Image: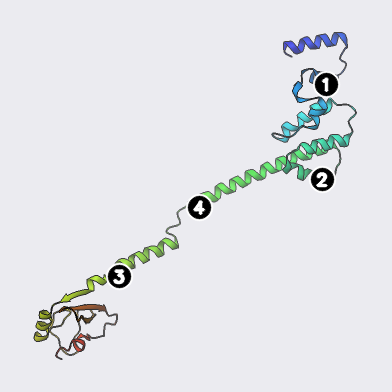
Amino acid sequence: MDREALTWFQWEDSHRPICSSAKLNSMLIERFRYSQGGTLCEKFLTLKQVGTVSTYRPEFEVLASSLHDVPEHILESTFINGLISQIRAQVRLMKSIGLFWVMEFAQRVEDRNLMLKQDMLRSESTCKGCLHMDYGPSVASTKHSEFKSKSNLAPNSNALVKRLTDSELQARKTKGSCFRCDGKYSAGHRCKNKALQVLMVHDDTNDALLQDVCVRDKGETSEHGTILGCPP
């Protein structure tokens, strides 16, 4: 005891002897309780679980022991009502068999919930570790890479179009040259780059556009001789 409590005890014991620990406990609470918290009965009825059941239970027992002639079912109902909602809902599922077992069951419910929470945290930690493991490139990234590669290999349409002046066209016709590869044109001629040329002549200009179209079939011959009217 501190000095103030010891002085009070000596004074009380000299005037009205304290015969039991229960009486001493109730007198201590009555003497040193926080006056703004109300009477013992008020504090008892408004007591709520703030932390764990392990801390709530002793607080309840201290206040309950200071109140005399309180029926068992009132004590039991007050204890259950002060529990947090998660534990209170599970305790109410149990058939009432007395205050002691209600308090014990509440403690066991809390212990079980704590264990389940720890297991869940460990499972989440394990799952996060699996997600960070390197399983190689994903399907989406692989398809993106393939598409990018094909895009890089795709021919540039601008590069397949070139302009030929009227004089150049006439010169190639005279020489009998291929308009694509500049090689000698003859029946069954095949360009080395396996491409089909399409000649587009604009009425408002003297220029002609020679456009190359890629040919997939290796056996296909050039058809531009017929289009341009080149000699066979």
Q: Earlier in the sequence, mark 1 or mark 2?
A: 1
Q: Are marks 1 and 2 in contact (CB under 8 Å)?
A: no
- Name the amino acid, label 1: Ser
Residue 149 percent across, percent down from the top left = 33, 65
Q: Residues within 10 Å of mark 2 (few under 14, many from 20)?
A: few
Residue 159 percent across, percent down from the top left = 22, 71
Q: Residue at x 76, y 25 (%)?
A: 37
Q: Residue at x 81, y 25 (%)?
A: 40
* Camera-side mark, 2 or 3: 3
Tag 3 residue:
154
Q: Earlier in the sequence, mark 4 or mark 1?
A: 1
Quadrant of the image containing the N terminus: top right
- Name the amino acid, label 2: Met
| Residue at mark 4 to residue at mark 1: CA–CA distance | 59 Å
What label sits on residue 94 in the rendered view?
2
Q: Residues within 10 Å of mark 3 (few under 14, many from 20)?
A: few
Tag 4 residue:
131
| Residue at mark 3 to residue at mark 4: CA–CA distance | 36 Å
* Camera-side mark, 3 or 4: 3
Horizontal side of residue 27 vs 118, given as left or right: right
Residue 95 percent across, percent down from the top left = 84, 45
Q: Earlier in the sequence, mark 4 or mark 2?
A: 2
Q: Earlier in the sequence, mark 3 or mark 1?
A: 1
Q: Residue at x 63, y 46 (%)?
A: 119
- Name the amino acid, label 4: Leu
Horizontal side of residue 101 vs 194, given as left or right: right
Tag 1 residue:
26
